[in-house]
Image: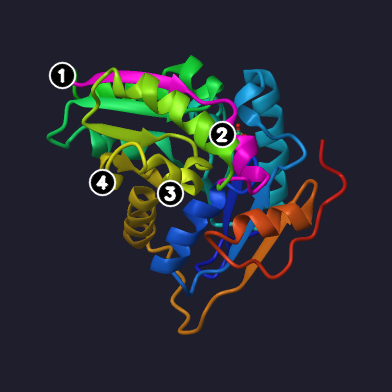
Amino acid sequence: MTRLNNSPIGFFDSGVGGVTVFAQVKKLLPNENYIYFGDTKNMPYGEKTPEQLVEFAVNIFDFLKSKNVKAVVMACNTTSAVVYDKIKDKYPFEIYPIIQPVAKKISKLPEKRIGIFATQATVNSHCYKHELQNNNPDIEVFEVPCPSWVKIVENGEENTTSARTAVKEKMDEMLKFKPEKIVLGCTHYPYLLGVLSEFAPQDMFINPSVEIAGIIKDDLWTKNLLNNQDREGTEEFYVSANPEKFQKSASIFYEIKSTPALKNFI
Ligand code: DGL
């Protein structure tokens, strides 16, 4: 099938996290057509093996390919860290991982002590650390895994006492490193910004969703792949389980109208 300017842009994440990226891209590119897939049946990805993560990603990429996408945004840090290198040349469309281009941008900042909050699998890969230090060897990186945060967000429990306790525990650990900037290295974490900013000024946190949206827009423009229609584009959201919960939890960032659950996903 030919990929055209009006072919959709695909997004994928383990759940509602990628909606933080989708909402930013949609703000910049309202006329594009979009397809989002949240793998809510298999989340949390941060606790999965590299083999499992590749299997999930291939399955979802094949689905997005069948929808004739012109590009796919890996709106998931864990997959960008563990899977991107393995599949980046296997599909006939643009693939945008989140960590690699964002780390490049961060490495140009004046701040040199960078903290990373991420899933266990992302921390195990040291993808942020490698990408930041390959671009700038003077950067010091401190990575803190936050395994409990993803479920708090998927369950819409950001404003509970247990969320505050879970965030405080990790912030205490992080602040000992005296970071100048802290990267929210999992797309679910921006949902916790309200709680996080009780412990450090909001401008200390870097939300990669904001950075990546501009990078995607510029790249599609350079490759002459933008949709030039002069009306708002379409959007389709799919999940592999629990569509109502997905819609409700995502609503902090985006009002989703309908979310069919696709049955035949592993
Ligand atoms: N939101 C994903 C990320 O950015 C994965 C979270 C998870 O399912 O553990 O890493």
Residue found at the very far right of the displayed protein? 263
What residue would you read off at disc 4? 203
Label 4 sits on what residue type? Asp
Dividing the image into 4 quarters, which one contains the N terminus? bottom right
Q: CA distance from mark 4 to mark 1?
A: 22 Å
> Does the magenta-highlighted stretch encompass residue 156?
yes
For the residue pair 225 and 49, the one nearer the viewer reads as 49
Within-10-Å neighbours for mark 1: few <14, some 14–19, many 20+: few
Q: For disc 1, does the CB lie below 8 Å from ligand 1?
A: no
Residue at left 33%, top 56%?
Answer: 214
Residue at left 42%, top 67%?
Answer: 27
Q: Earlier in the sequence, mark 4 or mark 2?
A: 2
Residue found at the very far left of the displayed protein? 110
Within-10-Å neighbours for mark 2: few <14, some 14–19, many 20+: many
Label 3 sits on what residue type? Gly
Magenta segment boundaries in residue numbering: 139-158
